[in-house]
Amino acid sequence: MLDSGHTDRAGRRVTLRPVDDDNWRAVADLAPRDDQRDWVPALAARYLVLTMRSDVWTSLAVYADGSVVGHVMWGVDDDGSRWIGGMVVDAAEQGRGVGRAAVRTLADWLGGPDAVHPVRLSYHPDNAAAARLYTSLGFAPTGVVEDDELVAELRR
């Protein structure tokens, strides 16, 4: 379990845990708001399949206290950079700071105390909410575009 002590706006502790036999169904059923479907799949199940079929990505369940409320995945690129990807916060949980706490927790872990490798993520340029969130957490666009998404790197 990854626990950096971050909480959402309701004071619930947000932790990241491996997807396992006990929580995979709850993770698979997570769905974003309808207005986000241009940027994320209709269900987090797509990300679970991606991580099963890929050697790059690893899925994590996002918990607020004891409840599954989201999904996020991470990976390591060929250059050693650490990546955050595939985040979905369930529609009923959005606007409560869960996504912010999840990204902070994962970035803390991926960056580690030595911070040898950069932490990166990407988002669609039309996704203004993602751009605001990631910028507020210290991610800055690198000028690189991959698969129609802007790549941003955590400033240290």
Image: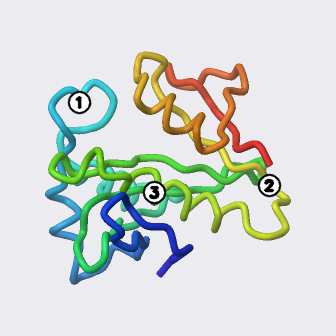
The residue that appears at 48% across and 18% down in the rendered structure is 125
The residue wearing badge 3 is: 73
Q: Secondary structure at mark 3?
A: strand
Applied colour scheme: rainbow
Q: Position of residue 136 (x, y in %)?
A: 58, 38
Q: Position of residue 127 (x, y in %)?
A: 40, 23
Disc 1 crowd rating (10 Å Cα; few below 14, some 14-19, many 20+) is few
Disc 2 crowd rating (10 Å Cα; few below 14, some 14-19, many 20+) is some
Q: Are marks 3 and 2 in contact (CB under 8 Å)?
A: no
Q: How many marks?
A: 3
Q: Amino acid at mark 2?
A: His
The residue that appears at 60% across and 44% down in the rendered structure is 137
| First of labels 3, 2 by sequence position | 3
Q: Amino acid at mark 3?
A: Met
Residue farthest to the front, as pictured: 10
Q: Amino acid at mark 1?
A: Arg
Query: Is 108 on the left-hand or right-hand side of 124?
Result: right
Viewer-proximal residue, 25 or 139? 139
Viewer-proximal residue, 156 or 52? 156
Q: Secondary structure at mark 2?
A: loop
Badge number at residue 117: 2
Q: Position of residue 107 (x, y in %)?
A: 61, 58
| First of labels 1, 2 by sequence position | 1
Badge number at residue 37: 1
Q: Position of residue 68 (x, y in %)?
A: 24, 69
| First of labels 1, 3 by sequence position | 1
The quadrant where residue 142 appears: top right
